[in-house]
Amino acid sequence: MALASAPPPSPARRLLATGAGLARSRTLVIGGGLLLLLVLLSLCASWVTATDPLQIRPRARLRAPDWTYLFGTDSLGRDVFSRVLHGGQVSLMVGLLSAALAAAVGTAVGLLAGISRLVDAVVMRVVDGLMAIPSLLLAVAIVSLVGPNLLSIVSAIAIAEVPRVTRLVRGVVLTVREEPYVRAAEGLGIPTPLLLVRHILPSCIAPLVVQTTHMIAAAILAEAVLGFLGVGFPPELPTWGNILAEGRPVFQRAPWTIVFPGLFLGATVLAVNILGDGLRDRLDPRLARTVKATP
Amino acid sequence: MTAPAAAPDPILEVRDLTVSLPGGLDRANAVEGLGFDVHRRQIVCLVGESGSGKSVTAAAVMQLLPRRVLRVTGGTIRLEGRDLTAAGAAQMCRLRGNRMAMVFQEPLTALNPVMRIGTQIAEVLRIHRPDMAAAEVEARVLALMEDVRLPDPAALRRVYPHQISGGQRQRVMIAMALALEPALIIADEPTTALDVTTQAQILRLFRDLLTHHDSGVLLITHDFGVVADVADHVVVMRHGRMVESGPPGQVLTRPSHPYTRMLIDAVPRFRFRAAVPAAAAPALQVSNLQLTYRSRSFTGKKRETHALDDVSFTIDPGETLGIVGESGSGKTTLARCLLRFEMPDSGQIRFGGRDLAAASRRDLRDHRRRIQMVFQDPYKSLNPRRHVGQSLVEGPVHHGVPKREAAERAAGLLEMVGLGGDAMRRFPHEFSGGQRQRICIARALAMEPEIIVADEPVSALDVSVQAQVLELFEELRRRIGFSMLFITHDLRIASNICDRVGVMHRGRLVEIGRTEDIFRNPGHAYTRELLAAVPGGALGTAGER
């Protein structure tokens, strides 16, 4: 029996294996491609542009975009193109890491709360408490306490998002665990952890993907706000948030200082959202079928 | 039956009706070339299995088809002489409710849960008769509630839908449909969600109201028992086409089309099994099982529901014990207790030398393998995200069977339940309801259980599929020899498959014994009531298998 030797391929592997699969998941290709492009541009920033993002040029302040400075220069004469590309490294990292962290912690806690009454009673009160504190205030408090570095900023943003994920996952678990197919699996003697991972967690994926894409965008913005408030990364370090914050006072005279980092931020959020939609469709066989059926 | 032959003008006249499906599906039309009439004081039954186009026809008459998917592409529908296919939206709005009304299958979801039922009935009047005085509306509501035999209308109109029973809700729906004295009532499976005893009452109500209000009824059903009880005219549909029509006496007794004959033959009848000698030791012994649900209302008043009240019985090896009763009688709670999805308050479930009611989690895991359950709804009891093979292999692998062996056995089981081995790699949504229930049965058997608890395993299926699945159960039991607790609300099905049967009423097992003895000489009044309510008395033929 083929099933015994080779388990059915995961959606991702099946996708890679067949060209037809690729054609069908247009959203996955477009979203993934755009995100990959942005990540590559940021990672290879030093090769793409030779200019130093930190170099101040008092004589070239607020230059409009031209062939020397593709995106123009900011109020200190730094090259906006170079700063945006280099800034992507930090911003994308913060966005992806904090969203991943929040999703992972929130899902684990939400699953436990959905299945155990005791955990539910304790954890959900903590979650309620966390939700009562404005998330930005919480992040500011944490960063000012620990000091600004990648770890503290990522965790500060993630902690503020965890309660939302927890509530979302718990809600799904509470509905799905009453489904006959979960009961049936329980009747087969499947132990609770496996039951959670195999039969309940997949139902959480669709809403979770949507929430996570939203969190990535929100985290990039939150990092920007932290920078703007002066508790984030030091202002000279190029991040999209810092660039936007510094461009704000000169926006009317030099719109390019805001427009270009804004475009990159927007493109990232768009890419992540499209990717999320594609993933959701691929991960649900019922949706996958509908996609197939529509000409 | 009182079909007035001398009524020249039908209320509803459907001619050559064709409703098209979007391209790329298995057939081009949902309904094709359908024609029938509904006269005053007449009940016309549209009968057919799921997918036959019954409900589409009803929606076409009401002009409630989802416009982007289904379109009337041919034929005419005339209501009292007016062509509905040419009627505009505003005209249809006036006709709906006024001249034709609809009663739906599920009365709980069709009623607004946050509106008192009196107000809901009155709303229909207020919208269509804005000039009616308030006192007049109130009087009319009370009269309507009286008409559909709702007890104590004055008090009942102040309650909310969840506070009354399913049968009463359906009566409210019918009262709403009757409010404006429509010429035509379309009832789409109005009794399918109801218990047999309630079903009989509602059907009788339809018949009475017909003469009282001088309307016609288009009744959509899949149940030939219902047809035999109330129809004046029968239209049998299959794949969107009419295969046969005529008075019930003719269609039911001398069907001309083989499909009609097949459907009628598939209707379960009372058929008893030969007695089997009792075994020395029971496979399962349940004694004094007790489970009470306690809830507290908003005002702090305590409410107790005895879901299981001192339930005791045994099942012999290889025996099938049926549990029959209405919804809410505790049948499913009993099943859940046996699987220990629910913890009984007290009592014993002795199985394999151990008391399951007191077993620890670890003991339970081991025992779960030996008692397996088949659920009612095959659409919900398979994980939609996993291949059939994965679902079948999961349990055995977890109990230590090597993966390869489990997969081989699963393929063999699929073969045994009548599905090909390629079913392993497919998803549940690629199968029909009957096939899914076969998969569920194979999944239960993959664990090599000693007892199978089947909770209404065929009630979600079409009659012809029902018969096949029941046959499958019977054959598997002969070949493999497991015991079975078979829960059903249909006494005819119970008589086909059960050696012994227990009758449950309000959490109590009021009667238990050999199926034939119980059904031929019911000892308890409630059993007699259940038997009297079985639909299709005209079809019933009792015989020994």
Image (cartoon, coloured by chain):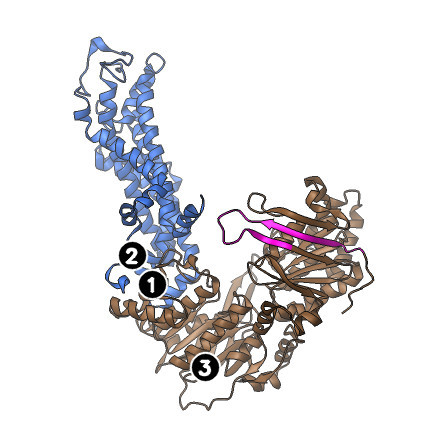
Chain colours: A blue, B brown
Q: Quick check: is B527 in the magenta stretch?
A: no
Numbered label attached to residue B458: none
Numbered label attached to residue A8: 2
| Image quadrant in which you'd find residue A270 | top left
Q: CA distance from mark 2 to mark 3?
A: 46 Å
Q: Secondary structure at mark 2?
A: loop
Question: In the rendered structure, which segment of residues is drawn in magenta?
Answer: B9-33
Tally of numbered tags: 3
Other-residue count near label 3 (Cα within 10 Å), few / some / many at <14 / 14–19 / ≥20: some
Residue B199, how many percent across, how many down? 65, 67
Reading the image, the residue beneath label 3 is B287
Front-lying residue, B450 or A217: B450
Q: Judge from the rendering whether residue B437 lies leftward or rightward of residue A36; answer left or right.
A: right
> Residue flagged by tag 3: what amino acid is it?
Ser
Front-lying residue, A272 or A148: A272
> Residue flagged by tag 1: what amino acid is it?
Gly
Reading the image, the residue beneath label 1 is B389
Between circles 2 and 3, the one closer to the viewer is: 2
Residue B500, how many percent across, how many down? 51, 83
Residue B410, how many percent across, how many down? 33, 69
- Whether residue A212 is visible to the viewer of this picture, yes or no, is no
Q: Are marks 2 and 3 in contact (CB under 8 Å)?
A: no
Q: Secondary structure at mark 1?
A: helix
| Image quadrant in which you'd find residue B49 | bottom right
Q: Are marks 1 and 2 in contact (CB under 8 Å)?
A: yes
